[in-house]
Image: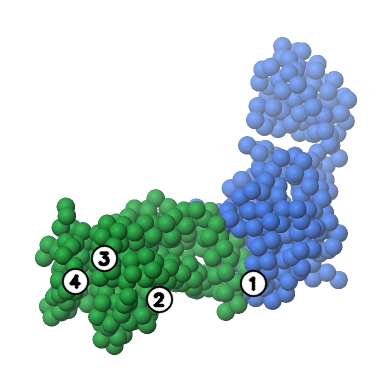
Chain colours: A green, B blue
C-alpha cells in the first residue's frame, strides 16, 4: 500500500510538470467548457446545465489518453525495466496510475462545476453524489481501458492511432459532442454499444433529473463491470519490457473488455428506454436553442 | 573460507530460434568482482538479466544469495542491486525524488542523501533526469543500485558510451566498492575494464563461456611471450611467419599479423629479413605484453571489438 501511495504521489508530480498533460487535462477541458457554455448554450444556465454531462464526460474520458501514452512511453524508454528491478508488482504500477488520475482529474471536475455555478449561474446540479460516483467509476474504467490499449500496442504510434479511433467513436457516437437524440437513428443504435453513451447519459440523468444511484442501476453496474474487467485484463496483459512478446490471444482479451457493453447494447437496443429518455431530456431542455449539431 | 554467493549451471536462454546463451556455468564468491567479458551479442546481458530475475532461463539452474530468480523474485530483488544497459527514468523526475522513490520500495535502505553526496550528485539533487549528462545519469544509476545496500551488485556495461574521463570516474567508484568488499558481477566489452577492475574474468563468445580465471591466469595462457603486431604491404603466409626464429605462433587478425614471440629481438630481425627476401614491406609494427585481448584473439581468432 505504501508503495502504491508513493508511486501515485510521484506520478502526480511528474504529470503536473508535463506540459502536454496540462494541455489535455486542463486547458482542453476548459476550452470545451467555455465553447459549450458560451457558444452552444449561449450562456443560458438551463442549457449549460444540460451540457454539463457532455462537458464532464470529455474531462473524464480524456484520462485514457494520458494513461495509455504514459504506460507505452515508460515501456518503450525502458523506464518500466528499471522499476521491475525493484520488488514491485505490476498491480502496484496499475493501481498507482489510476489513483494518481483521480487526484489529477477530480479537481478539474470540481473546477468546472464551480465555473458553471459562478460564471453561467447554473443553480442546480442534481444529485451530486451520483455525479461524483459516476465520475470516479468513469476515471477507473476509461483509465483501465487506456492501460489495455497500451498493453496490446507495441509502439507509441500504434497506441496513438488506436486512441484516435477510440476517442472519435467515444465523443461523436455517444452524445458527448452531438446530443444522442439528434444523431441518425442508426448511429443512435450503434451508440448503445459504447460505454461513453451510458456515461454521458448517467451524468445527465444525475444532473438534470436528480437521479439516484439506484435508479441509474444499469449504468452504474455496467461501468463497474467494465472497470473491473478492464483493470483485470490490463493486469494480465501488463508488459514491463518493450520486446516482451504479446501473448497470441492478447488482442482477444482486449476485445473481451467490451463484453459488458455488447450485452448491454443488445439489451438496450431491444428493450431499453435510454434513447427515448435522452430525447426527452433534450426536448425538456428549457431553451429555444438548437443543439450544436442542428446548426451545421 | 569463501562461499559462492552466486551459482550458474548450464544456463540456456533462447530468443525464438536464436540461442543467446548456450550452457554457461560459473560461480562468484562473496566479496569478489567478477567480469563477463565478450563482444556485443555474446550473451552477457542475457545471462546477467536471468540472474536479476528480468528474464526467464530456458534451461539450467541459477541461484543468487541462495535464491532462485524465478521462484523467489521479490526476496531476490531485496538482495540485489543493478544498473541496466537499456534503461531510463521519467524525464521530469528530480534526482532526489528518484532515489527516494526507489528507496521506498525496499525493506532495508541506505540513506539516499549520503548516496547522492558520495556519487557527487549533491548539487544536482534538484535537477530533472533529462537535464543530467551521460556520466551523471550513470552515477545516479549506481547510487540507485546501492539504495537497498545489496549483497550482490550487477553492472551491465557500466561505462558503455561514456567518454574516457567519465569512464575513469566510474572506475574509481567501482574500485571503491571493491575495497568495501561488495560482490560485483559486471559485463563489459572493454579489455582494460576487465583487467583493471575484476578479480576474475569469464570470456564469453557466441553464448558460450570459453575461458575463465584471474586476468593474470588468463594472460599466462599466452605463455611468457611478447606480442608483436605487424601490418604488411602485401599478404604473407602466416605459416611461414610462425616458423621464424623466436616466434611461437602467428595469427592473422583483421588484415594484421599477431606474432607471439618468446624472444623479441631475434624475431624482429628474422621477420625483417624474411620480408626483404619476399619483396614485402613493413607498414607498421607494435610490441606489447599480452593482454586479455590476445587471449580472446587466440581463442576465437577475432578481435573483441569489431
Ranked by sequence position, the earlier of labels 4 and 2 is 2
Q: Chain of mark 2?
A: A
Left or right of B143 in this view: A283: left
Question: Are discs 1 and 4 less than 8 Å apart at CB?
Answer: no
Which label was assigned to residue A43?
none
Question: Are discs 4 and 3 less than 8 Å apart at CB?
Answer: no
Question: For mark 2, what is the residue?
Answer: A136
Left or right of A62 in this view: B43: right
Dot 1 alpha-carbon crowd within 10 angstroms: few under 14, some 14 to 19, many 20 or more? many
| Horizontal and vertical percent position of residue A242 | 49, 56
| Horizontal and vertical percent position of residue B253 | 67, 32
Secondary structure of the residue carrying tag 3 is: loop
Question: For mark 3, what is the residue?
Answer: A44
Q: Nearer the viewer, mark 2 or mark 1?
A: 2
The Cα–Cα distance between marks 3 and 2, rounded to whole angstroms, is 28 Å
Label 3 in the same subunit as label 1: no
Q: Nearer the viewer, mark 4 or mark 2?
A: 4
Ranked by sequence position, the earlier of labels 3 and 2 is 3
The Cα–Cα distance between marks 4 and 2, rounded to whole angstroms, is 29 Å
| Horizontal and vertical percent position of residue B290 | 81, 38
Q: The C terminus of chain B is located in which quarter? A: top right
Q: Chain of mark 3?
A: A
Question: Are discs 2 and 1 less than 8 Å apart at CB?
Answer: no
Residue found 12% across the figure and 78% down from its top: A270
Question: For mark 1, what is the residue?
Answer: B105
Q: Nearer the viewer, residue B83 or A156?
A: A156
Label 4 in the same subunit as label 3: yes
Q: Is residue B271 visible?
A: yes
Q: Chain of mark 1?
A: B
Ranked by sequence position, the earlier of labels 4 and 3 is 3
In the displayed structure, would residue B144 be above or below residue B245? below
Q: The N terminus of chain B is located in which quarter? A: bottom right
Amino acid at each position: 500500500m505504501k508503495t502504491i501511495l508513493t508511486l501515485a504521489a510521484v506520478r502526480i508530480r511528474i504529470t503536473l510538470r508535463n506540459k502536454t498533460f496540462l494541455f489535455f487535462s486542463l486547458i482542453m477541458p476548459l476550452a470545451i467548457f467555455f465553447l459549450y457554455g458560451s457558444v452552444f448554450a449561449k450562456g443560458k444556465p438551463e442549457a449549460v446545465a444540460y451540457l454539463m454531462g457532455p462537458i464532464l464526460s470529455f474531462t473524464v474520458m480524456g484520462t485514457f489518453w494520458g494513461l495509455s501514452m504514459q504506460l507505452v512511453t515508460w515501456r518503450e524508454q525502458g523506464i518500466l525495466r528499471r522499476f521491475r528491478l525493484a520488488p514491485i508488482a505490476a498491480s502496484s504500477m496499475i493501481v498507482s496510475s489510476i489513483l494518481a488520475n483521480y487526484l489529477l482529474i477530480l479537481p478539474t471536475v470540481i473546477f468546472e462545476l464551480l465555473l458553471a455555478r459562478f460564471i453561467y449561474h447554473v443553480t442546480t446540479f442534481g444529485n451530486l453524489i451520483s455525479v461524483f460516483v459516476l465520475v470516479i467509476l468513469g476515471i477507473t474504467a476509461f483509465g483501465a481501458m487506456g492501460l489495455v490499449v497500451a498493453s496490446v500496442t507495441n509502439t507509441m504510434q500504434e497506441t496513438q492511432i488506436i486512441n484516435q479511433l477510440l476517442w472519435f467513436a467515444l465523443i461523436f457516437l455517444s452524445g458527448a459532442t452531438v446530443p444522442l437524440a439528434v444523431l441518425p437513428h442508426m448511429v443512435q443504435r450503434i451508440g448503445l454499444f459504447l460505454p461513453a453513451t451510458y456515461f454521458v447519459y448517467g451524468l445527465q440523468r444525475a444532473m438534470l433529473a436528480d437521479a439516484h444511484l439506484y435508479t441509474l442501476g444499469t449504468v452504474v453496474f455496467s461501468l463497474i463491470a467494465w472497470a473491473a474487467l478492464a483493470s483485470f485484463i490490463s493486469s494480465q496483459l501488463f508488459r514491463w519490457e518493450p520486446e516482451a512478446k504479446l501473448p497470441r490471444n492478447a488482442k482477444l482479451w482486449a476485445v473481451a473488455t467490451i463484453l459488458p457493453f455488447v450485452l448491454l447494447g443488445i439489451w438496450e437496443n431491444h428493450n431499453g428506454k435510454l434513447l427515448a429518455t435522452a430525447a426527452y431530456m433534450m426536448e425538456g431542455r428549457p431553451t429555444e436553442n438548437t443543439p450544436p449539431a442542428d446548426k451545421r | 573460507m569463501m562461499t559462492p554467493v552466486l551459482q550458474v549451471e548450464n544456463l540456456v536462454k533462447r530468443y525464438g530460434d536464436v540461442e543467446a546463451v548456450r550452457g554457461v556455468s560459473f560461480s562468484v564468491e562473496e566479496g569478489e568482482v567478477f567480469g563477463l567479458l565478450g563482444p556485443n551479442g555474446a550473451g552477457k546481458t542475457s545471462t546477467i538479466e536471468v540472474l536479476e530475475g528480468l528474464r526467464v532461463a530456458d534451461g539450467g539452474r541459477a541461484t543468487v544469495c541462495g535464491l532462485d530468480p524465478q521462484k523467489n523474485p521479490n526476496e531476490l530483488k531485496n538482495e540485489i542491486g543493478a544498473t541496466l544497459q537499456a534503461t531510463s527514468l521519467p524525464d521530469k523526475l528530480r534526482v532526489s525524488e528518484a532515489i527516494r522513490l526507489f528507496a521506498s520500495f525496499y525493506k532495508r535502505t541506505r540513506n539516499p542523501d549520503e548516496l547522492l553526496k558520495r556519487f557527487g550528485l549533491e548539487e544536482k539533487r534538484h535537477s530533472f533526469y533529462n537535464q543530467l549528462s551521460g556520466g551523471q545519469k550513470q552515477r545516479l544509476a549506481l547510487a540507485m543500485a546501492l539504495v537497498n545496500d545489496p549483497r550482490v551488485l550487477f553492472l551491465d556495461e557500466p561505462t558503455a558510451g561514456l567518454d574516457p574521463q567519465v569512464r575513469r570516474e566510474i572506475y574509481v567508484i567501482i574500485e571503491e566498492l571493491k575495497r568495501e568488499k561488495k560482490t560485483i558481477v559486471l559485463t563489459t566489452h572493454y579489455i582494460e575494464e576487465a583487467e583493471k577492475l575484476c578479480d576474475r574474468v569469464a570470456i564469453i563468445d557466441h553464448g558460450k563461456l570459453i575461458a575463465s580465471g584471474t586476468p593474470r591466469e588468463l594472460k599466462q595462457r599466452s605463455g611468457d611471450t611478447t606480442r608483436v603486431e605487424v601490418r604488411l604491404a602485401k599478404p604473407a603466409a602466416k605459416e611461414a611467419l610462425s616458423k621464424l626464429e623466436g616466434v611461437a605462433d602467428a595469427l592473422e587478425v583483421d588484415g594484421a599479423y599477431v606474432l607471439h614471440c618468446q624472444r623479441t629481438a631475434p624475431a624482429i630481425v628474422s621477420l625483417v629479413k624474411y620480408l626483404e627476401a619476399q619483396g614485402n614491406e613493413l607498414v607498421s609494427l607494435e610490441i606489447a605484453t599480452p593482454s586479455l585481448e590476445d587471449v580472446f584473439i587466440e581463442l576465437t581468432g577475432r578481435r573483441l571489438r569489431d
